[in-house]
């Protein structure tokens, strides 16, 4: 989903919107009838995930394979470094925990390490994707 499509979707349900301010623009500063184009032009972004979203993570460890179901529990802005999001990932194996980013991911990890749909995760597991 593109930034514009995500923003358009969020604008339809503002009670679920999770906009991030940039360059001093906030939703309260915008005129009635705001559009995704207006927001994009003013530096507002929509994250690819929101709190409570379910993510799917294919895994392989010690000869076993499967798909972990993770819930987004925290969104982080790291000034100058972009965004990350934490999940409820849990294990008692320290090496496994570190191998899978301690359950913390960046937007660039979507489609590579974690997936938005179970079908994508199953396909990646079948293809042997990391």
Image: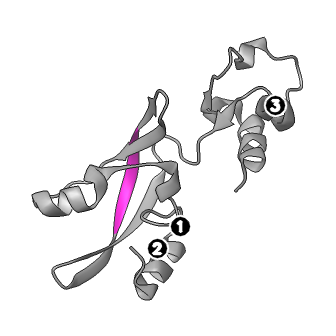
Judging depth in this view, the residue of 79 and 34 nearest the camera is 79
C-alpha gap between disc 3 and disc 2: 33 Å
Furthest residue in direction front, as rendered? 80
Upstream in sequence: badge 3 or badge 1 = 3
Q: Is residue 94 left or right of residue 75?
A: left
Q: Is residue 106 left or right of residue 19?
A: left
The structure residue drawn at horizontal position 81% and vertical position 17%, both measured from the top left corner, is 30
> Which residue matches tag 2?
121
Residue 89 on image: x %, y %: 27, 53
Judging depth in this view, the residue of 123 and 22 nearest the camera is 22
> Which residue matches tag 3?
41
Find out whether the residues at labels 1 and 2 contact each other: C-beta distance under 8 Å: yes
C-alpha gap between disc 1 and disc 2: 7 Å
Tell me if residue 81 comes above or below residue 110 in the rendering. above
The structure residue drawn at horizontal position 50% and vertical position 82%, both measured from the top left corner, is 123
Tell me if residue 79 comes above or below residue 101 in the rendering. above
Does dot 2 land on a helix, a strand or a loop? helix
| Residue 74 tag number | none
Depth check, mark 3 against mark 2: the one in front is 3
C-alpha gap between disc 3 and disc 1: 30 Å
Residue 58 on image: x %, y %: 37, 72
Give the extent of the magenta segment: 68-74
The structure residue drawn at horizontal position 71% and vertical position 37%, both measured from the top left corner, is 13
> Which residue matches tag 1?
117
Q: Overall secondary structure of the magenta stretch?
A: strand
Does dot 3 land on a helix, a strand or a loop? helix
Residue 101 on image: x %, y %: 29, 54
């Amino acid at each position: 989903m593109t930034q514009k499509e995500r923003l358009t979707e969020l604008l339809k349900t503002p009670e679920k919107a999770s906009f991030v301010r940039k360059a001093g623009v906030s939703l309260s500063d915008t005129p009635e009838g705001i559009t995704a184009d207006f927001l994009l032009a003013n530096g507002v972004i929509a994250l690819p995930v929101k709190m409570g979203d379910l993510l799917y993570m294919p895994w392989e460890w010690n000869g076993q394979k499967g798909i972990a179901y993770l819930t987004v529990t925290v969104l982080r802005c790291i000034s100058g470094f972009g965004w990350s999001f934490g999940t409820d990932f849990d294990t008692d194996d320290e090496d496994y925990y570190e191998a899978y980013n301690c359950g913390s991911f960046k937007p660039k990890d979507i489609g590579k390490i974690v997936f938005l749909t179970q079908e994508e995760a199953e396909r990646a597991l079948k293809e042997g994707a990391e």
